[in-house]
Image (cartoon, coloured by chain):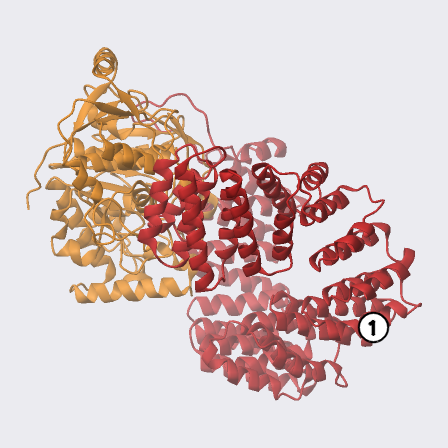
Chain colours: A red, B orange
Amino acid sequence: MRRRARAPAAAEAAARRRPVNRPVPALAGVAEPGVYPRLTRGGSLWLVAAALLVVPLHSVRAQVIGEAVELERTGRHDRAAVVYLAVLRGEPTNLAALLGLERVLPPLGRLPELLPLVRRALARDSTNRAFRALEVRTLATLNEPDSAEDAARRWIALAPGDEGPYREWALALADARRFDEARAVLVAGQRALGGSRAGALAVELADLAARRGDWEDAARQWGRAATAAPDQLPNAAAQLVDVAPGQRDRVTRALVEDPSPVARRLGAELLLAWGDPARAWAVFEPAVTAAGSPQAAFALRRFADLAGARGTAEGRRVRALALARLADVVPQPVAARARADAARALLDAGDFAAARPVLERLAADSTAPADAQALANTALVEALIRQDDLDAATARLAAVGDRVPADDRAALGRALVRARIRRGELARADSALAGDSSVDAAALRGWVALYRGDLKAGADEFRAAGPYAGERRDAVERTAMLALMQQVRRDRFPELGDALLTLARGDSIGAVQALRLTAGQLTAEGQRGGAAELLLLAGRIAARPGAGPEEQRTAATLFAEVVRIGEGGGEGTGAAAPAAELEWARLLLRQLQALEAVRHLEHLILSYPESAVVPEARRELERAKGAVPKS
Amino acid sequence: MRAVGRTAGLALGADFLGAPSPLTAFYRLLPPSTAQLLLPMDDLQSDHLKAYGVAYRVVQAGLRAEWLLNYRGGSFLVPDGDAIRRDAALAGVRVEPVTDTQVTAIKGEIEASNMDAVPLEKAPKVAVYVPPNAPPWDDAVTMALQYAGIPFAKVWDPEVMAGGLRTYDWLHLHHEDFTGQYSKFYLIYAGAPWLGEMVRFNGAAARQLGFASVPELKKAVARGIRDYVGNGGFLFAMCTATETLDLALAAEGVDIAAAFADGTPMDPQADAKLDWSKALAFTGGHLEPNPQVASFSDIDGHQVNAGFRRQPLGAFKLFNFSAKIDPVPTMLVQSHRDVIPDFYGLTTSFMRSRLKPSITVLGDEEGAPWVKYVHGDHGKGTWTFFGGHDPEDQQHQIGDPPTDLSLHPHSPGYRLILNNVLFPAAKKRELKT
């Protein structure tokens, strides 16, 4: 039956999908708007098919194939099949149409229709690999294994050096769960393709072994595949990494004992993924530097990245070793950068002793690029600070001059000041800050003043620093100190400065005792609010996570004291008591005393309904009652 | 502990840590009082969801509360007392003391408007249908119950088959696939340990209870649930449970499960053999014949996992009912928001064309062919279906962290869930065994 032709543009417009139909007028009781995307009723489809018959242009066919794919995507397999068939009538060897039919005919139960079309295509182009593969797959899907085998053998005869027939034939057998036969086909294929292609079909054999659960064989095959094509190594690692723990030893042994350095590298990567970086490096290092080991630099960089991604100290250390090794195999200037990265990695791993000579060598290397030298010098100063060798750090910083950018020099200088403060060398810290008008320097001067007991100067400097100096955590700390100083209401308080310096130097127990004494002084002066705040601070220090039982008992005593002060009333006592009750409850929760914690939290919420800590208290109450969902 | 939540939480209210609730015990000591407290449910309320819990515990203590439908967002009127104030304060729920004069004025306003005052007389005993080995998704209803502090018990297939539902007033279904096809999760999560465990666990249960396959067991459970509703129970179902419950009921004696579920493919004539008269809400639905498509039927409007069929989310609007003439649907739609953003689930919505004519639509998306929230009667009981998985997680994926309701204390979607929990308290009934 002839169809009336329309202009192609109109057909195209008619075939274009309509958007989801919303909004639409209000529905009648049983009316149902057509909201799903749909074409006009078949009209454009026949027009498209007719156009193909009349105008066999490649560009039109390509566009029509696109339309058919769109039909497929919207689930209209029957209509897509019509289009594909129409294309093949005009061009029997159109691969896109054949593959399209391979997708849409099975859900329609019409796959047998594909076979004669494939054979027609083969009749016109008997050497086309895609057609041959399609014939084998179709026969396998039609559950004609003998015919599939015949088709594969015909293909082999035509292309004896091609992996394709063995691959398709084996896949068809494997999909039918005939694993042993599939394996035999692949092994026969390997043999037929010859020794020069030892990696041929290894990936397929590995995949097959994995499907059968034979991970040791899969590892061996992946080793062969990666040896033949080192680019396969990441794929191999990705598949083998999910091996069950019980089989990992066998997999590792199969790879580590393989003569191929690439296979041993694969084994090393797996050891890394399975949490044994030290052993991984012991296997990897000789493999990557062995004669004939390809892409050593790439492999070392990859290994370093994988080791760093572990996030463990040992992983970071192994990363550093890999980077140091990388520096030996790459030319300058990459070597210098790699050496600097290795040194940083050693510092990150906490191995200062190992990092220092690497850094010094790099810093002294005048042939190294400027940024690598800057990196080395910066890292060296940081390392010296961390090792508490402040005089050496000061000397090194003075010596680097403009080899380190100005901003980095300033940051290093402030790090030195912080280190001096922690050692109690307040005068040296102060003098180091002379002439520095930055907000970071103001913040540090504030701490120096505070530790000297000059609360007014400290508060002034903190206000000058504002919220911008340092990290957010630093700003919060300064704000907390300002709030504390407001409650203390003294311009000078050397004992408090000493107590805070004791805390800054890491002596928590000493700081708690000192803060209790300062609170006692304020109580004697009638400053109950300030005393409560100091006791609260002492309690928080004593209750910190990791504190021992004795300190925890001290914390509870201190919190109880603050609560008693709050209940007694008085100026400035309002905020400390609920905060103490909350900290007390948190301590009890850490001690798994949920009932007691609940009692405190309920008391807090009911007694201090206007307190700023009530929302936190409610949250802790829910947590204590198990009402907060766990991820 | 009498009731345990999914996340190993502790049930609130009754039997906290094995001790009787001090709250309910204390309530009974209160002298008679005419003083009352209003729990407003408009935008002034500081925690809408916990307000339901406060109201529930008042009723649980044997005190009388009233639900003021459409008054200030569906407020509650409860007796005034220290223990109730204490409970509200701890929960962060706003209460407003009201004098007799104010109560009179409120009642006058209710009388003159599309409002009603419904007494709440009996706290329902709540059960949640969930397998003992918790699947890795979260149930919006159990989260709401835990957050509000409403106790609940867990039941599963053995309890249903043994007639255990009769001891509960209210039953919740969420993510269960009553067609027995494990929600077709194998299409996306094949190999996942939890899926393997689910298959093993359900298979063992089917064998233990004497069923040839899991689909057959689930169909029997579905019939048990339908009978529970028919005998006067209240059913609230969300997500997959809505659609699959009805499919299971309609498919009595028909194989609608794919081969991976029961070893045999779906009956090619299954569609024609479905008996929709046995279902609760739906009719005329067509089964998804392709086991490779993550959809059960064409009942669901959004088809979230069916690739190209997936429809984008909009928002749904709650209907207005006459509070005095239709108190039940009015209770179910109490909210301080009329329009609520939609959210996906394995069953997100219900096509209008698949609804039985007798059911009541409570909320729908204007202009769309689907509805979101429906209610109906069956025998002496009622059921409510609410599409979607989690009102505050529009595109929840398995493995996503559970919704923390303390971040959504005013959630209108979760209010709809809690409306369903509280609504049985408004009726006096005895469940027949």
Residue B402 x/y as whole percent? 41, 49
Residue visible at 29% across and 51% down in the picture: B10
Q: Residue A190: which quarter of the image?
A: bottom right
Q: Nearer the viewer, residue A559 or A373?
A: A559
Residue A151 visible in the picture:
no
Residue visible at 48% across and 32% down in the picture: A571
In this rendering, would B115 be left or right of A175? Answer: left
Image height of B432 relative to A427, above or below? above
Local crowd size for mark 1, using a 10 Å CA cut-off: few (<14), some (14–19), many (≥20): some
Q: Label 1, on which residue? A: A330
Image height of A94 relative to A254, above or below? above
Residue A376 x/y as whole percent? 82, 64
In this rendering, would B190 be left or right of A439? Answer: left
Q: Residue furthest right?
A: A366
In this rendering, would A613 be left or right of B299? Answer: right
Residue A454 x/y as whole percent? 69, 43
Q: Residue A460: which quarter of the image?
A: top right
Q: Residue A349: which quarter of the image?
A: bottom right
Residue visible at 25% across and 42% down in the picture: B150
Residue A431 x/y as whole percent? 82, 51
Image height of A180 relative to B254, above or below? below
Residue B80 visible in the picture:
yes
Tell me the quarter of the image containing the N terminus of chain B: bottom left
Mark 1: amino acid: Val
Q: Residue furthest front?
A: A524
Q: Nearer the viewer, residue A396 or A552?
A: A552
Q: Nearer the viewer, residue A631 or A6?
A: A631
Image height of A154 relative to B129, above or below? below
Q: Nearer the viewer, residue A334 or A131?
A: A334
How many labels were placed on the picture?
A: 1
Judged from the image, the secondary structure of the residue bearing numbered disc 1 is loop
Chain under callout 1: A
